[in-house]
């Protein structure tokens, strides 16, 4: 089990390195966020021992429990990548190094206030965009992006870092590419890489396409930790 996690982590890092090279992007320009949701702490320990430091979680309670159980892992960085409700913000604000899923002015304001009050440093914040316009998905609509970005910049406790998206599922991974390109176009329309240096996009299925489109963070679960129940 643990050997499998270490081997799969190495395989994912190799996939990323190959895609970065084929896309003629600088080595190290794409970072791996290991998505450990629903997986046991022991698997996180194995990935950490193999050098992984950034981990993504989707659910507040699971993040709180795992961060507490793994507090001995020095330098581990937790990223919130699931939908965040305003009434849960206070539970995560001191635990996470980044939130990838701010999608409303009200959430930006609450997160910014809690981050500032907590005395932690500025919280790295990405704004999630629902590029596919799917009703069941979180993320702000492209037309709401301007006000949400402005709210993040206004918030004293937040540091605006970039954009994040989860494209609609397509059986062919190449089907995600137009949605990744749409996120890039939105970044370009809202200040470009100077204002929004990070693009969090690409998962197990389609990370190469995300890297070709310009991802700086890929969020990978299944290819590292195996299928989820
Ligand atoms: C679960 C999840 C991932 C990882 O997906 P895999 O297909 O398992 O790599 C990435 N991003 C988000 C937002 C997720 O919820």
Image (cartoon, rainbow, N blue to C red):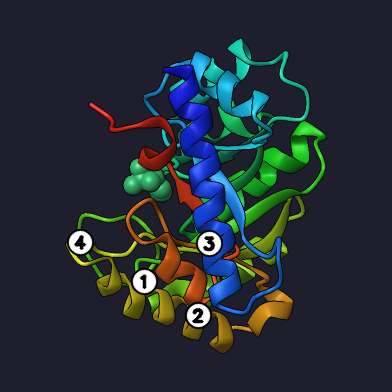
The correct choice, above or below, for 155 with respect to 182 in the image is above
Percent of width and height locating residue 227: 28, 33
Measured Cα–Cα span from mark 3 to mark 4: 18 Å
User: Tag 2, which secondary structure?
Assistant: helix
**Which label sits on residue 184?**
2
The reply to whether discs 1 and 3 touch (Cβ–Cβ < 8 Å) is: no
Quarter occupied by residue 118: top right
The reply to whether discs 1 and 4 touch (Cβ–Cβ < 8 Å) is: no
Q: Which of pointers 2 and 3 indicates the residue nearer the eye? A: 2
**Which label sits on residue 127?**
3
User: Tag 1, which secondary structure?
Assistant: loop
The correct choice, above or below, for 8 with respect to 147 in the image is above
Can residue 149 be seen by looking at this rendering? Answer: yes
What residue is disc 4 on?
135
The reply to whether discs 1 and 2 touch (Cβ–Cβ < 8 Å) is: no
| Point 49% across, 56% down: residue | 15
Label 3 Cα neighbours within 10 Å, binned few <14 / some 14-19 / many ≥20: many
């Amino acid at each position: 089990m643990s050997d499998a996690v270490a081997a799969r982590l190495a395989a994912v890092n190799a996939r990323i390195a190959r895609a970065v090279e084929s896309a003629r992007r600088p080595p190290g320009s794409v970072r791996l966020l290991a998505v450990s949701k629903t997986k046991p702490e022991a698997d996180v320990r194995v990935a950490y021992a193999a050098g992984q430091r950034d981990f993504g979680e989707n659910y507040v309670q699971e993040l709180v429990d795992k961060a507490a159980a793994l507090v001995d892992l020095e330098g581990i960085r937790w990223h919130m990548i699931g939908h965040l409700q305003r009434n849960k913000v206070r539970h995560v604000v001191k635990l996470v190094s980044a939130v990838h899923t701010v999608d409303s002015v009200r959430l930006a304001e609450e997160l910014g206030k809690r981050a500032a009050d907590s005395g932690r440093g500025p919280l790295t914040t990405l704004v999630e965009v629902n590029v596919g316009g799917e009703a069941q998905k979180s993320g702000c609509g492209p037309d709401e992006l301007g006000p949400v970005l402005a709210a993040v910049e206004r918030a004293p406790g937040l540091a605006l870092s970039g954009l994040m998206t989860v494209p609609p599922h397509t059986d062919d991974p190449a089907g995600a590419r137009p949605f990744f390109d749409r996120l890039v176009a939105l970044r370009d329309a809202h200040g470009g890489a100077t204002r929004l240096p990070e693009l969090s996009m690409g998962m197990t299925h389609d990370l190469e396409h995300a890297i070709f489109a310009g991802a700086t963070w890929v969020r990978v679960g299944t290819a590292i930790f195996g299928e989820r129940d």
